[in-house]
């Protein structure tokens, strides 16, 4: 849909709209509550943002190919249990982290294998693993929670370097990597091309199956990585880790302007989407002190942004 | 190619037969371990548990048949339950049941219509609309209930929902009625044929002059109505209304629809398959209880449900890839999914 008819004037409409919305929100928030714009306070409250943010990176790539991954939150539950069980039997944090990542890759690999080799729709596959991963975690751990992984490990998520939480650096690095991958490598072009016309990409000799397999496996890997941060932040590993994360992550990616049909979107949009949702939540919860309002606002933001994008598209075509 | 595998493949192609065999095998195994599984009380319990899922699955199936999806029914159920509690419980507004219940049904239908409008006229993909509603409606529910549970629904409604008429609760009778009604719509009306036609090829349907907007609006509104109906007949069975009602219900319903053999790309599926899937998936928990695996077993419920979907889709792929000796060739694989085909030739 984005393939222009020769005279596309300005290609950054989505980002511009998101930027304007974000700035408008921040200005309003700043006027209503002057303490809101304090950078230190913002960074302190940003801790749980980084977990969504990390998951949103592979999710952007997957949605760009026209797929979806509903299982990331459940994969986190499974990874957390693997982490906890490994720690309680070996007592080694490093080994537990490794197991956690491996379990994540394995889970993502199962998704990728079913989607690319068995040709099943991603929505169905990840719906199945959404239930299966969480169920595996619950079944294996029997609802038990593991905790007390030591002071040093807590520093992974709680520590600050120069006033900025450590996971933020990780996100910055990975986001840059993903953005460069998408815009500067053949692999990135394949991701967009698969989203536009998978059949054509396959006929031009690209191993579409392998690209998809790698994408879903990397989503699993990211779930493992996120679990490590999550477990470190709460110092607890339980099967309910990451419950409902998939919805927030998908919301951020879609609000960020990535088309759910694939082929259009970028990492910059996703970063803006993440910030917009995060700031909206912060503002709503500070202003009205009602937690439930947050989910209403985020749900409406999701539907509203898509309506807006649709409206813009129609106008562009005219 | 032996004739035995040939027959096996042909049998498995009929999703209903496979599901029925699975139900029979599981029942046989469990009842040898504990004959109490076949007691009338337990069978009735399975029926009662499956009733709300069956009712809503009838609607969601039609939505999926048109090539869309609805994952908001769980939150919608919670919102409607809260609304029903506020309207007719004796601690709140104390409206008459005969005003309150039609209001709940109307509200469900209107929210279904709203979803449909956003999908058809707003042109927002249904997965996104219902994902947004899943979050928003859940938030609205907790807001509406102000963190408190609601009890004190009218006695009459409670006893109808619990013991019911002729030994079966109201929800089971309603489920039977809805099943028959939906069955008639699908097999005996033009509306049913049109829904399937739209799902198998939106482009061809449009060229024949069918209104995509109206058909999809119907499917979503019907789902909203049925969700309200399921709420009205099933929720009074519970001792009190909590904001957590219907958590995960949307996924259970979609699972039933998919395991029941409805193609997610639209246009294909049978009601019988969906109902067998509802029974099979509802059986998981009672079966685990009867196998006496205790608390440990119940924790595996979700894993087993996930496994069922995986099994269903894998059989689908394996079976459709291997041609039988008959003239019936392999089922052609659609090149594009329903999500992509949305942007069809304009």
Image (cartoon, rainbow, N blue to C red):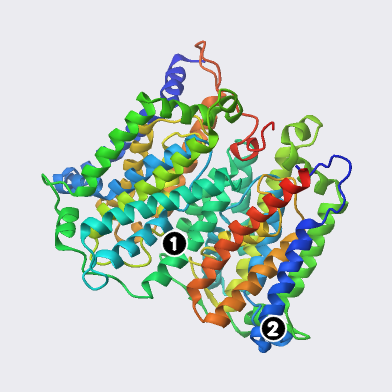
Q: For the view shown, which residue lies furthest in the left direction?
A: B166
The CA span between labels 2 and 1 is 44 Å
Do tag 2 and tag 1 residues touch (Cβ < 8 Å)? no
Q: Nearer the viewer, residue B242 or B280?
A: B242
Count of numbered tags? 2
Numbered mark located on residue A30 in the image: 2
Is A193 above or below relative to B189?
A: below
Q: Nearer the viewer, residue B12 or A147?
A: B12
Residue at image position (21%, 70%) is B90
Q: Residues within 10 Å of mark 2 (few under 14, many from 20)?
A: some
Residue at image position (49%, 39%) is B216
| Residue corresponding to mark 1 | A138
Q: Secondary structure at mark 1?
A: helix
Decide if residue A38 is on the left or right side of residue B208.
right
Residue B258 visible in rendering:
no
Q: Secondary structure at mark 2?
A: helix
Residue B47 visible in rendering:
yes
Q: Nearer the viewer, residue A147 or B208?
A: B208
Is A187 above or below relative to B297?
A: above
Callout 2: residue from which chain? Answer: A
Q: Position of residue B130 (x, y in %)?
A: 51, 52
Quadrant including the C terminus of chain A: top right
Q: Residues within 10 Å of mark 1 (few under 14, many from 20)?
A: many
Q: Nearer the viewer, residue B84 or B280?
A: B84
- Are discs 2 and 1 located on one and the same chain? yes
Is B10 above or below relative to B262?
A: above
Callout 1: residue from which chain? Answer: A
Is A199 above or below relative to A293?
A: above
Q: Earlier in the sequence, mark 2 or mark 1?
A: 2
Q: Position of residue B212 (x, y in %)?
A: 54, 34
Quadrant including the N terminus of chain A: top right
């Amino acid at each position: 849909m984005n393939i222009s008819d020769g005279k596309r004037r300005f290609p950054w409409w989505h980002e511009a709209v998101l930027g304007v919305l974000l700035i408008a929100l921040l200005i309003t928030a700043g006027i209503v509550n002057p303490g809101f714009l304090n950078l230190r306070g913002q960074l302190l409250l940003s801790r749980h943002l980084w977990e969504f943010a990390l998951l949103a990176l592979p999710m952007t790539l997957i949605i760009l190919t026209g797929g979806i991954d509903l299982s990331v939150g459940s994969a986190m539950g499974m990874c957390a249990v693997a982490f906890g069980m490994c720690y309680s039997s070996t007592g080694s944090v490093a080994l537990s982290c490794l197991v956690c990542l491996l379990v994540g890759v394995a889970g993502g690999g199962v998704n990728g294998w079913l989607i690319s080799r068995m040709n099943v729709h991603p929505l169905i596959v990840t719906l199945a693993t959404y239930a299966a991963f969480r169920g595996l975690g619950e079944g294996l751990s029997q609802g038990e929670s593991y905790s007390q992984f030591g002071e040093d490990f807590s520093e992974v998520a709680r520590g600050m370097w120069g006033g900025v939480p450590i996971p933020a650096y990780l996100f910055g690095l990975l986001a840059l990597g993903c953005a460069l991958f998408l815009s500067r490598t053949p692999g990135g072009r394949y991701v967009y091309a698969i989203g536009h016309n998978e059949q054509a990409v396959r006929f031009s000799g690209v191993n579409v199956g392998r690209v998809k397999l790698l994408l879903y496996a990397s989503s699993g890997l990211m779930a493992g990585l996120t679990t490590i941060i999550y477990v470190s932040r709460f110092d607890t590993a339980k099967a309910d880790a990451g419950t409902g994360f998939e919805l927030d992550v998908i919301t951020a990616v879609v609000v960020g302007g990535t088309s759910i049909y694939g082929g259009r979107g970028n990492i910059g949009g996703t970063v803006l989407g993440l910030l917009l949702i995060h700031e909206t939540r912060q503002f709503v919860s500070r202003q009205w002190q009602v937690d439930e309002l947050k989910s209403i606002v985020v749900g409406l933001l999701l539907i509203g942004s898509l309506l807006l994008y649709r409206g813009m598209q129609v106008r562009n075509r005219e | 190619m032996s004739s035995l595998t040939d027959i096996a493949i042909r049998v498995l192609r009929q999703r209903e037969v496979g599901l029925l065999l699975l139900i029979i095998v599981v029942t046989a195994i469990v009842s040898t371990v504990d004959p109490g599984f076949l007691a009338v009380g337990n069978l009735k319990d399975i029926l009662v548990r499956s009733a709300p899922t069956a009712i809503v699955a009838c609607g969601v199936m039609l939505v999926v048949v048109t090539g869309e999806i609805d994952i908001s029914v769980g939150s919608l159920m919670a919102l409607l339950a809260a609304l029903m509690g506020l309207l007719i419980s004796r601690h709140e507004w104390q409206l008459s049941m005969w005003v309150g219940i039609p209001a709940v049904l109307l509200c469900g239908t209107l929210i279904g219509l709203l979803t449909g409008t956003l999908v058809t006229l707003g042109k927002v993909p249904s997965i996104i609309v219902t994902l947004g509603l899943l979050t928003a409606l859940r938030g609205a529910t907790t807001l509406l209930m102000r963190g408190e549970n609601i009890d004190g629904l009218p006695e009459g409604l409670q006893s109808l929902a619990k013991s019911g008429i002729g030994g079966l609760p109201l929800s089971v009778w309603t489920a039977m009625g809805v099943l028959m009604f939906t069955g008639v719509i699908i097999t005996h009306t033009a509306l049913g044929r049109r829904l399937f036609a739209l799902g198998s090829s939106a482009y061809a349907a449009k060229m024949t002059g069918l209104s995509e907007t109206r058909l999809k609006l119907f499917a979503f509104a019907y789902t909203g109505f049925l969700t309200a109906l399921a709420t009205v007949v099933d929720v009074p069975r519970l001792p009190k209304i909590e904001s957590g009602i219907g958590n995960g219900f949307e996924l259970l319903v979609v699972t039933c629809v998919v395991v029941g053999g409805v193609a997610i790309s639209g246009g294909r599926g049978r009601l019988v398959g969906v109902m067998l899937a509802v029974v099979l998936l509802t059986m998981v928990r009672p079966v685990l209880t009867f196998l006496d695996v205790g608390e440990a077993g119940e924790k595996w419920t979700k894993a087993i449900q996930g496994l069922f979907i995986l099994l269903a889709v894998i059989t689908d792929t394996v079976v459709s890839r291997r041609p039988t000796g008959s003239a019936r060739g392999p089922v052609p694989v659609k090149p594009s999914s329903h999500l992509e085909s949305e942007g069809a030739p304009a």
